[in-house]
Image (spheres, helix red, strand yellow):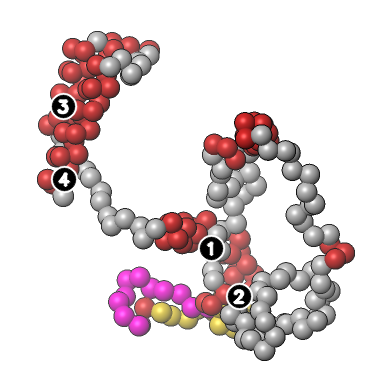
């Protein structure tokens, strides 16, 4: 890594100096003097002697691997259903991992009172106004409508007047137990087994055969 660090340092500073000579760097305020070549060279001199830290890792295995990596941070919840063991009058039992221990013994069981479990779970809920994912560029929320309209204009594509994407509440199937709206998570052929399997604590899946 030391060789890679020094190689990166040399190439980075070379490109930075070339960009400065081309007049493509701008400086303002207390850094305005760096626009002069001599001052800029003096500013970079200590950086040529410092040891740079370069972090390198194997590249991802394609777009699917990148999405899988990011989704673990953007779409996972505080605790997966697969870690839940039981829920009764004594509380909620779940599995947790002790990273200080290696091997199979690192997986342990914990039982918390219902209210304490909910309290800990809600700690992971983002406060109002905070978002895990913020769109940038074309789909940035502040300019999304104007950007899409401009893109349609440049591409000579008519404005979409299609049907609404959301299904009205009245048309959604109802749960026979609680009466709430059910969500379709999978469609499969008659006689085939669903890929989605129920998880604890209910271990139950309802299938609409209509």
- The residue singled out by tag 2 in the image is 113
6 w.r.t. 29: above or below: below
Which of the numbered marks, if any, corresponds to residue 93?
A: none
Q: Residues within 10 Å of mark 3 (few under 14, many from 20)?
A: few
Asked whether disc 1 touches disc 4, contact meaning CB atoms under 8 Å apart, the reply is no
Q: Quadrant of residue 19?
A: top left
Q: Which of the marked residues, 1 or 4, is nearer the chain's N terminus?
A: 4
In this rendering, position of residue 103 left or right of residue 189:
left
| Numbered disc 4: secondary structure | helix
In this rendering, position of residue 90 left or right of residue 42:
right
Find residue 197 and report its horizontal and vertical position in percent. Answer: 59, 81
Q: Which of the marked residues, 1 or 3, is nearer the chain's N terminus?
A: 3
Asked whether disc 2 touches disc 1, contact meaning CB atoms under 8 Å apart, the reply is no
Q: Which of the marked residues, 2 or 4, is nearer the chain's N terminus?
A: 4
- Residue reaching furthest bottom? 191
- The residue singled out by tag 3 in the image is 46
Asked whether disc 3 touches disc 4, contact meaning CB atoms under 8 Å apart, the reply is no
| Numbered disc 2: secondary structure | loop
Q: CA distance from mark 1 to mark 4?
A: 35 Å
Which of the numbered marks, if any, corresponds to residue 76?
A: 1
Q: Which of the marked residues, 3 or 4, is nearer the chain's N terminus?
A: 4
Answer whether residue 199 is visible to the viewer in this image: no
Q: Which of the marked residues, 2 or 1, is nearer the chain's N terminus?
A: 1
Q: CA distance from mark 1 to mark 3?
A: 44 Å
Closer to the camera: disc 2 or disc 1? 1
- Residue reaching furthest front? 156
- The residue singled out by tag 4 in the image is 4
- Residue reaching furthest right? 170
Q: CA distance from mark 3 to mark 4?
A: 19 Å
Q: Residue at x 54, y 39 (%)?
A: 136
Q: Residues within 10 Å of mark 1 (few under 14, many from 20)?
A: few
Q: Residue at x 80, y 81 (%)?
A: 210
């Amino acid at each position: 890594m030391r060789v890679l660090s020094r190689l990166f340092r040399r190439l980075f500073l070379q490109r930075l100096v070339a960009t400065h000579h081309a007049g493509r760097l701008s400086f303002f305020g207390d850094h305005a003097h760096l626009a002069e070549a001599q001052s800029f060279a003096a500013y970079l001199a200590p950086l040529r002697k410092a040891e740079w830290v370069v972090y390198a890792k194997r590249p991802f295995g394609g777009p699917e691997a990148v999405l899988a990596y990011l989704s673990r941070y953007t779409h996972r919840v505080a605790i997966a259903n697969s870690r839940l063991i039981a829920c009764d009058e004594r509380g909620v039992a779940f599995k947790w991992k002790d990273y200080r221990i290696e091997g199979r013994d690192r997986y342990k069981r914990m039982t918390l009172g219902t209210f304490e479990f909910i309290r800990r779970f809600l700690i992971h809920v983002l406060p109002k106004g905070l978002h895990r994912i913020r769109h940038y560029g074309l789909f940035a929320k502040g300019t999304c409508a104007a950007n899409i309209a401009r893109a349609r204009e440049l591409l000579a594509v008519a404005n979409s007047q299609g049907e609404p994407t959301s299904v009205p509440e009245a048309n959604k199937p109802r749960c026979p137990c609680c009466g709430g709206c059910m969500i379709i998570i999978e469609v499969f052929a008659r006689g085939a087994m669903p890929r989605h399997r129920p998880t604890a604590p209910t271990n139950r899946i309802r299938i609409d055969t209509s």
